[in-house]
Image (spheres, grey):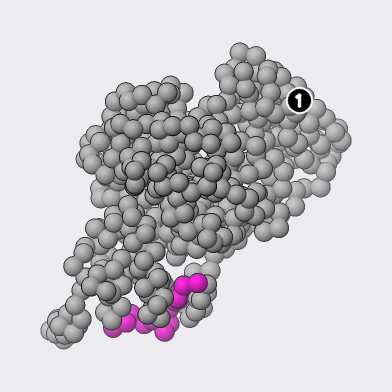
Amino acid sequence: MKIILILLISVSALFSSPRISVTELLVQSELYPTKVREARLLAISKSQPVNILTTGRVMIDAKGIEDGKVVYAVFTNLCDVYRGSYCAFYDEVKMLYEINSSRIDYGNGNIIDNTGGMYDPVITAAQASGTFLMIPDWTDDKVILLSAFNGDVVDLNFIPTTQPQLQSPKHAIQHFNVRNILVSDQLSDVVQRFDTNGSYINVFAPAGGLNNNILDNIRGIAYRPNFNLLVTVGSGLSQNTVQHFDTAGNHIAQYINTGLNSPFAILIRATDILVSNFSGTNRISRYDLNGSFLSYLYTGSDFAGPQQIYRLPNGKLIVAAFSPPSGIAYLDSNGTFIRILNAVTGNRAVYLLGNGRYLTTNSTGIYEIDSATGSVVRTILTGANFQYADLYIPGGPVSVGNNGYNTPSGYHLYPNYPNPFNPSTVIKFTTGKRGYVRLTVYDAEGKEIRKLINNKVMDKGSHSVEFNAEGLSSGVYFCLMESEGYSSHIKMILLK
């Protein structure tokens, strides 16, 4: 014991430690991503790593600068990033950890892996059609694709590393024309547009290109029911606002400019809009569908630094809380706090998987959580700063040209026509053999609207069915086809 104490004193005497605490460092890096970029660039200029993963499952990540030196966050518990974590300069890191037996990322794609591949991701073979999750990788400036049913990795390069267009991607959503993906990028300060092959198209918003008077340090994005785009803004002249763009990406106006304190994520419900506030004690603000302030949905101290908000099928809410008290917060529909699941902390994303478990992301990875007990079921991916999770429901093969997979022979669900429609549209599909078919329509929140075909035996070949949406409100609807092990969704837009 005396020897260990003497050793620790000796290390402390040899190397000074950063003055900033790990909590302050993580919050700073979340609010101001430019500081993370500056730290990484400094590390690269000094031939120091930007990220280290040790065989002892410690992650060391460049996140700040102090006294001209790179400040590393040392995560000793990859799930609970606040437990046992601390800040260190590189001299101290080299003294305490076996760098030469670690996975070392020197930036710009220069990675040396001496761990024997212990952090290599497991890619799960999956069918081409179905429901997926897009999650931006903030470290490698790309978007990955997971199964929305169980979180299995489907494609690590759904949108591959794309620079300078992606410098700090935060939120990816499917464009309403199905065939495009929009990605909000914190450092390029625009919403970028890609096709589903992962190829860059253009700046979607603002349509005229970069304009820091409108967008600066953007975070979450969401569609209004009319498919106009909303974007949260954290810095600059439009700080603490939600900006409004039309369906072509043209700026309309400020949509929300009151009741916000470092806004991050947007959730649009049937009768109101919720926006999470990272700073301050008014954690979630509530607005009507025209952007007028209604109330603060939650103002307590049970969690802090809220980011993504997800509405459960029963109407209750789960919230990814980044700052201590951190975890997955569980609220009723009116904002009353119920409990917090904190086996994983530093949370950014939260999503209810099809298997009934939660998926969450933080500064070190992606995790599957038991929704009843809150325990970690498994670590899905490790080693990057992962961001928000959002649905991708293709009308055809996923990510052809990256890691797409073939559909079962003879089965296909085609995009409905017309789309958008009012009030009727035709849905066509083919079956590879005689068997049971189910065709079900859901609304944007996952509620079943109508069974168009209910376990009906149908012959092999081409079929079509009409969907009449008389009596339904304008919005996004999904049609799910299931037959003999085949499953696929299409996205339908009702415009009245």
Question: Quadrant of the rendered structure where residue 317 is?
Answer: top left
Q: Which residue is mark 1?
A: 426
Can see residue 263?
no
Residue 133: % across, % down: 55, 47
Q: Is residue 135 left or right of residue 419?
A: left
* Dot 1 amino acid type: Val
The vertical placement of 235 against 440, above or below, is below
Residue 154 painted magenta: no
Q: Nearer the viewer, residue 9 or 237?
A: 237
* First to last magenta residue range: 93-108
What is the x, y in percent for residue 123? Answer: 60, 61
Residue found at x 70% / y 34%:
481
Tell me if residue 463 comes above or below residue 422 in the rendering. Answer: below
The quarter holding residue 459 reads top right
Element under disc 1: strand
User: Which image quadrant is residue 334 in?
Assistant: top left
- Asked whether 413 or 341 is in front, the reply is 413
Left or right, 56 with reference to 165: left
At a point 25% along the width and 58% down the height, the residue shown is: 23
User: With 61 as the anchor, is 225 left or right in this view?
Assistant: right
